């Protein structure tokens, strides 16, 4: 399991995460629980997804990212790219650790506010690595791999010009329909 190495790589790449769904009690009957949400659909293996090209240059520009700043990386099983923008740095990567592998380490102190969620109905999770909340990563289930969209706001930016958690989730929602789907 490379979750520890990946966490270190994500910290180095200015990554982290946000956005969650929770269940609660209903007000109708004392002690009654809301029904559990349906299990997310099975996904196809996303091992061949190139996170560096999943968004076009015009799409990156529309996000406020400069396509010409792309830096590729391949370290410790984490393969992806990073781009600089006016108000944040975007990192998108594929990791050879599964979403379940991350979930098993949710109590690791490297992960701040680790919570399960979904991206367009696909299983996911979010976590931070910066206690100040300037870095967020949204994980997406890719079958035998996990996919991550990370947004980091520079420390000297003052109040974040964008909410890194909301932006990471929004970008993940944009790319999710392009990911392989399981056969029905």
Image (tube, rainbow, N blue to C red):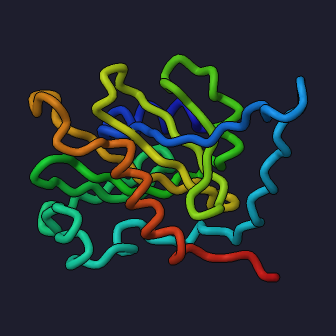
Classify residue 40 as left or right of residue 168. right
Q: Seen from this angle, which residue lies furthest top?
A: 109
The image shows a total of numbered marks equal to: 0
Q: Which quadrant of the structure image shows residue 16? A: top left
The answer to whether residue 117 is seen in the rendering is yes
Please, is residue 62 above or below residue 11 in the view? below
- Give the camera-side residue of 155 and 49: 155
The answer to whether residue 1 is seen in the rendering is no
User: How far from the left and from the top, in percent, is residue 49?
Assistant: 51, 71
Q: Seen from this angle, which residue lies furthest front?
A: 28
Please, is residue 73 above or below residue 23 in the view? below
- Give the camera-side residue of 54 and 40: 40
Classify residue 175 as left or right of residue 11. right
Please, is residue 37 above or below residue 5 in the view? below
Classify residue 172 as left or right of residue 108. left
User: How far from the left and from the top, in percent, is residue 32?
Assistant: 89, 31
User: How far from the left and from the top, in percent, is residue 50?
Assistant: 44, 71
Residue at horizontal 11 percent and vertical 28 percent from the top? 158
Classify residue 183 as left or right of residue 180. right
Point out the image quarter for the C terminus.
bottom right
Residue at horizontal 71 percent and vertical 44 percent from the top? 100
Residue at horizontal 45 percent and vertical 60 percent from the top? 172
Residue at horizontal 59 percent and vertical 52 percent from the top? 96
Q: Which quadrant of the structure image shows residue 59? A: bottom left
Point out the image quarter for the N terminus.
top right
User: How far from the left and from the top, in percent, is residue 152?
Assistant: 27, 41
Q: Which quadrant of the structure image shows residue 159? A: top left
């Amino acid at each position: 399991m490379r979750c520890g190495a990946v966490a270190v790589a994500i910290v180095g790449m200015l990554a982290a995460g946000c956005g969650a769904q929770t269940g609660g009690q209903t007000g109708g009957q004392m002690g009654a629980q809301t029904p559990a949400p349906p299990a997310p659909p099975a996904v196809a293996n996303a091992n061949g997804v190139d996170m560096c090209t999943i968004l076009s240059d015009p799409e990156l520009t529309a996000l406020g990212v400069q396509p010409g700043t792309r830096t590729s990386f391949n370290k410790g099983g984490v393969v992806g790219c990073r781009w600089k923008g006016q108000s944040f740095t975007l990192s998108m990567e594929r990791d050879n650790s599964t979403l379940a592998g991350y979930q098993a380490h949710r109590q690791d102190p490297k992960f701040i506010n680790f919570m399960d969620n979904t991206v367009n109905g696909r299983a996911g999770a979010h976590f931070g690595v910066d206690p100040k909340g300037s870095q967020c990563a949204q994980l997406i289930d890719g079958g035998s791999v996990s996919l991550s969209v990370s947004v980091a706001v520079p420390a000297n930016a003052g109040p974040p010009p964008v909410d890194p958690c909301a932006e990471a989730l929004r970008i993940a929602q944009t790319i999710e329909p392009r990911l392989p789907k399981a056969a029905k």
